[in-house]
Amino acid sequence: MTLTTILTLTISLSTAAAAAMSQDIAAATQEMQKANYFTFVMLLHMAPPEAFRGGNVTFLMPNDKTLAAAGAAVGGGGGAVLDFLLRQSIPSALLFDHLERFPTGTMIPASKPGFMYRVSNGGRRRYFLGNVRVTSPNICTRGYSVRCHGVDGVAEPVMVPRPDIPRPAPTCGGDVAAPAPEVQVSRQKSSSRGEVIDLGVIMICMVNLFL
């Protein structure tokens, strides 16, 4: 296979993936509106078009009343809106069935680099990501790359400082050093759609994330 053919296939696959993600975002916003998360949809429309077109995402959505009260934190132009949405999302498409498999103490990365949520898993009615409780799980389920859940406040993921001492960069496969205890690595299968979710990749190889 020639280099030109490989590049053509790569570009075609990237274009197809972007188109699928765009369709999933559109489907998700319809589901959000049906569940009365109109303000969150408005914020998504204010974000740069390419912000969430490149991969999987799970949004944590405060309701309209909560967002109205947090207007000062959300306002300030497109950059502030994007920063807010990155703090309110996880860079992987996770149904609540997947989230429930993370035990208390697990650290899950936010879409904003360097920020993470700490899981407090008290079951379906007492499941927290950082300071917010998941109150309306699985609102977005139609697409494959976008999930969303209603939460009871504005998420405040914690900043994880970069380590001072460089460490070897692990990979997501092959023979690598064991992950840190808080990194829960497993492969789970969605009961509703049959897609395989790699929870090791969900953690984005956490050591790599902060190096």
Image: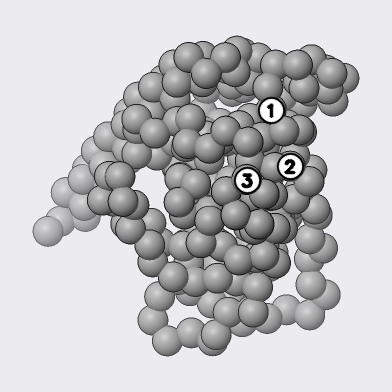
Give residue 103's position: percent from left, percent from top: 60, 66
Give residue 188's position: percent from left, percent from top: 38, 62
Give residue 2's position: percent from left, percent from top: 15, 56
Name of the residue lying farthest toward the right: 72
Is any part of residue 113 visible from this angle?
no
Give the residue at mark 2.
132
Report the residue at 65% width, 50% height from top.
Answer: 127
Q: Residues within 10 Å of mark 1 (few under 14, many from 20)?
A: many
Report the residue at 79% width, 80% height from top.
Answer: 165
- Snapshot quadrant of residue 42: top right
Q: Residues within 10 Å of mark 3 (few under 14, many from 20)?
A: few
Q: Which mark is residue 62?
A: 1
Towards the viewer: 15 or 39 = 39
Q: Which amino acid does the dot numbered 3 rest on?
A: Arg
The answer to whether residue 110 is left or right of residue 28 is right
Callout 2 secondary element: strand
Q: Residues within 10 Å of mark 2 (few under 14, many from 20)?
A: many
- Snapshot quadrant of residue 39: top right
Q: Which mark is residue 103?
A: none
Give residue 209's position: percent from left, percent from top: 63, 62
Give the residue at mark 3.
125
Report the residue at 66% width, 57% height from top.
Answer: 122
Q: Which amino acid does the dot numbered 2 rest on?
A: Val
Compare marks 2 and 3 and give the one earlier in the sequence.
3
Structural distance between the alpha carbons of marks 3 and 1:
16 Å
